Amino acid sequence: MPMHILNVVTVFLVVTVVGVEFSVSAFVNPAAWRLEAEAQLKMLSRFALVMGRVMPVWYPVCTLLLFVQTWLRWHEAGRDLLLAADAIWVLTSVISLFVLVPLNTRIAQGAPNWQRIHRIWDGRHRVRIAALAIAAILMLDVLVR
């Protein structure tokens, strides 16, 4: 029973991160782009504050859970898939810290070219979504067997 609970918590947290990231690209940004520039910047700045508080906790918790799942299944057939999921998740998290977070900070601070930066951020964010989704699918393949 404890393993089942760990699986459910891991799946829930990892999949919801992917879902939130997807919803930013699919729903939040398109809604923001329909606003006038001043309102758009205000919305993006406030959204960045909220996400800036949540994501620094959410990503490491997911990373830890993925590592625990890999450790617990070290001698099972799905280990390689979990190692790949771990690697993708960690690499994506690190790249986010050094590539996406600085861009998002510049947008939130209202840099003179914030709209151009936001378009760049959104394109790179879509790559992050794809990578996280691949990691989640690899993890799910092992956990739902």
Image: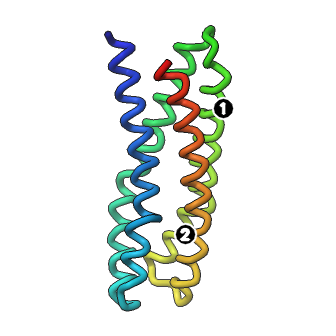
Task: Name which residue lies at 43% across and 36% down.
Answer: 61
Which corner quadrant of the image does residue 42 belong to?
A: bottom left
Image quadrant holding the N terminus, namely top left
Residue 42 showing in the rendered view = yes
C-alpha gap between disc 2 and disc 1: 25 Å
SS label for mark 2: helix
The tag earlier along the polypeptide, 2 or 1, is: 1
Vertical side of 85 occupied by 41: above or below: below
Label 1 secondary element: helix
Q: Position of residue 54 (x, y in %)?
A: 36, 52
Q: Is residue 115 above or below residue 91?
A: below
Q: Check disc 1 and report the residue beneath it.
A: 84
Q: Nearer the viewer, residue 136 or 70?
A: 136
Type of amino acid under label 2: Asp
Pinpoint residue 10: horizontal percent, then vertical percent. Answer: 41, 30
Quick one: label 1, few (<14), some, or many (20+) residues within 10 Å? some
| Residue 56 image position (x, y, % from top left) | 43, 49
Q: Which residue is mark 2?
A: 122
Of all residues, the one furthest to the front in this rendering is 145
Q: Tell me: residue 39, above or below residue 54.
A: below
Instruction: Using residue 117 as the reference point, say whether residue 28 is left or right of it.
Output: left
Which is more toward the observer, 60 or 81? 81
Q: Is residue 131 left or right of residue 7?
A: right
Q: Amino acid at mark 1?
A: Ala
Q: Is residue 135 above or below residue 94?
A: above
Residue at coordinates 56% horizontally, 21% vertically from top-left? 70
Cβ atoms under marks 2 and 1 closer than 8 Å: no
**Residue at image point 58% right, 54% down:** 128
Residue 33: assigned label: none
The residue drawn where x is 63% and y is 40% is 88
